[in-house]
Image (cartoon, rainbow, N blue to C red):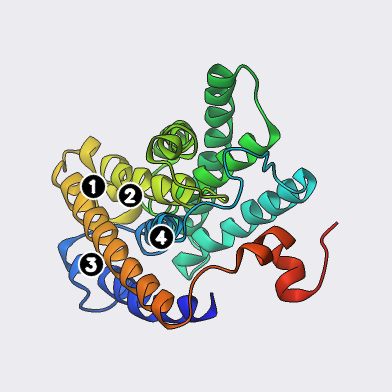
Amino acid sequence: MLWFMAIWSLAVYAPVAHWVWGPGGWLLDKGVLDYAGGTVVHINAGIAGLVAAIVLGKRLGYGREPMAPHNLVLTIIGAAMLWVGWFGFNAGSAVAADGRAGMAMAVTQIGAAAAALSWMFAEWMGKGKPSVLGIASGAVAGLVAITPASGFVGPMGGLIIGLAAGVTCFWGATSLKRMLGYDDSLDAFGVHGVGGIVGAILTGVFAVKEIGGTAGLLEGNGGQVVTQLLGVGVTVVYGLVMTYIILKVIDVAIGLRVSEEEEREGLDVALHGEHVE
């Protein structure tokens, strides 16, 4: 894990961050919009999570044994901390206390709340009942999707992006995961990958020139959607290929999975000698 984190940060995250945000970055020069990390952070990490889940394989008993979250109270506490912290993540990207930072903070709240609701209703319609875990997941999906758009869209754009993210990420974390047959316990791809893609593309639709200096499709600049698709495509392909190579090299060098005995015992015990109650 530590080797992967170090190598991935240098070989995957850093180049994409430079392309999108750095002076002379070619995606920046192409006009790709990403205010706070929808492509750089979320699509990048979501694709890495998908590749890692496929390369590592499924947990023992996956699909045959119940693997519910350990503690829903901690899940809600964690989601609440993320929600509040995201205001700094998005609004702080303005590096100023100005109107753009205020708008970024407002649409972050709107997008997260809208996605929590749309995920809840999608789950309610699909499974017959809503869940606390689903609402928390929806909120995070909305936070992810509004990340690239937060400094470029207004309240209505934030609302629609949030509603779209809740539904599409619910599909990504349930139907798409079953269709592809991978084991992603945190739904890194379903929430962060899919949410980042939705947010990045819709930024090109709802961008407001008066807010971020660039118009989107609704203001007559349809080419911005194409530019956003370029950013999404490059990030997906580069992240997929590089993550696969890194994982395979580490697997050959030191291995990726613990033994079956250690997995059955639990990694808290096997690696740290501690139990989580």
Q: Is residue 54 above or below residue 199?
A: below
Q: Secondary structure at mark 4?
A: helix
Instruction: State the separation of the CA atoms marked 3 and 4.
Output: 32 Å
Q: Nearer the viewer, mark 3 or mark 1?
A: 3
Q: Nearer the viewer, mark 1 or mark 2?
A: 2
- Using the rendered view, name the quadrant where residue 222 is placed: top left
Q: Earlier in the sequence, mark 4 or mark 1?
A: 4
Instruction: State the separation of the CA atoms marked 3 and 2.
Output: 14 Å
Q: Earlier in the sequence, mark 4 or mark 2?
A: 4
Instruction: State the separation of the CA atoms marked 3 and 1.
Output: 15 Å
Instruction: State the separation of the CA atoms marked 1 and 2.
Output: 14 Å
- Amino acid carrying label 2: it is Ala
- Left or right, 190 with respect to 214, comes to right
Residue carrying label 3: 28
Instruction: State the separation of the CA atoms marked 4 and 1.
Output: 40 Å
Residue carrying label 2: 200
Residue at the extreme front:
261
The residue at the point 25 percent across, 65 percent down is: 238
Q: Nearer the viewer, mark 4 or mark 2?
A: 4
Local packing at callout 3 (Cα closer than 10 Å; few below 14, some 14-19, many 20+) is some
Q: Earlier in the sequence, mark 3 or mark 2?
A: 3
Residue carrying label 4: 55
Q: Nearer the viewer, mark 3 or mark 2?
A: 2
Q: Earlier in the sequence, mark 3 or mark 1?
A: 3
Q: Secondary structure at mark 2?
A: helix
Residue at the extreme right:
277
